[in-house]
Amino acid sequence: MNRQQQTETHQRQKKQSKKELTFISADQAKFKEVTQGASMASLWGNYETGAYGGLTKFVPGFDAGMHTHTNDVRIVVIKGAYLYKDAAGEKRVGPGDFLFIPGGTKHWSGGDAKEGALFFDEMDGKFDLTPVM
């Protein structure tokens, strides 16, 4: 094996790093406010740069307004309720419930008036929110 092949092999090995068990308590997650009343914490990936899975918190009564996302969104509520509305109607997504929102879907979302919402969400690309009328 020549020097270049050794270097390429070493680089491939570094990319294939060993996977390790990860535990992050919702109470200890590093949340960052993304807009007033909504905070996010990446658990894997990075919601600011690419695909990710993470926790999102909405304060009680949070209103995201009508908007779209470029990428599909998958949500599982942990606590409180994620409120959702689109042209087909309204949904109250409670603890243990799953919601899939296809990218480009015009919708409104918010948090329960009393409890807000804590949910796991993931996207195949970076998080974005485009306001629409």
Image: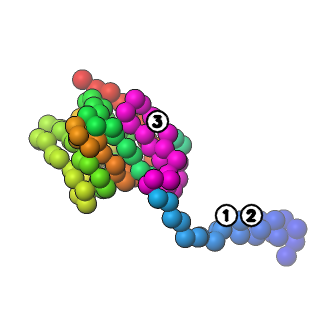
The amino acid type of the residue labelled 1 equals Lys
Q: Are marks 3 and 2 in contact (CB under 8 Å)?
A: no
Q: Does the magenta portion include 99?
A: no
Residue 94 relative to residue 11: left or right: left
Count all numbered tags in the image, as a single digit.
Answer: 3
**Which label sits on residue 11?**
2
Q: CA distance from mark 1 to mark 3?
A: 31 Å
Q: Does 36 appear above or below 70?
A: above
User: What colouring does the structure picture have?
Assistant: rainbow
Image coordinates of residue 79 in percent, x first then y, are: 29, 52
Location of the N terminus by quadrant is bottom right
Q: CA distance from mark 3 to mark 2?
A: 36 Å
Name the residue that disc number 1 marks. 15
Task: Name the front one of labels 1 and 3.
Answer: 3
Residue at (34%, 51%) from the top-left corner? 119
Name the residue that disc number 3 marks. 33
Tag 1's secondary structure?
helix
Q: Which portion, as a residue range, is magenta?
A: 26-47
Task: Name the front one of labels 3 and 2.
Answer: 3
Tag 3's secondary structure?
strand
Tag 2's secondary structure?
helix
The amino acid type of the residue labelled 2 equals Gln
- Earlier in the chain: of badge 3 and badge 2, it is 2
Q: CA distance from mark 1 to mark 2?
A: 6 Å
- Earlier in the chain: of badge 1 and badge 3, it is 1
Q: Are marks 1 and 2 in contact (CB under 8 Å)?
A: yes
Image coordinates of residue 105 in percent, x first then y, are: 26, 40
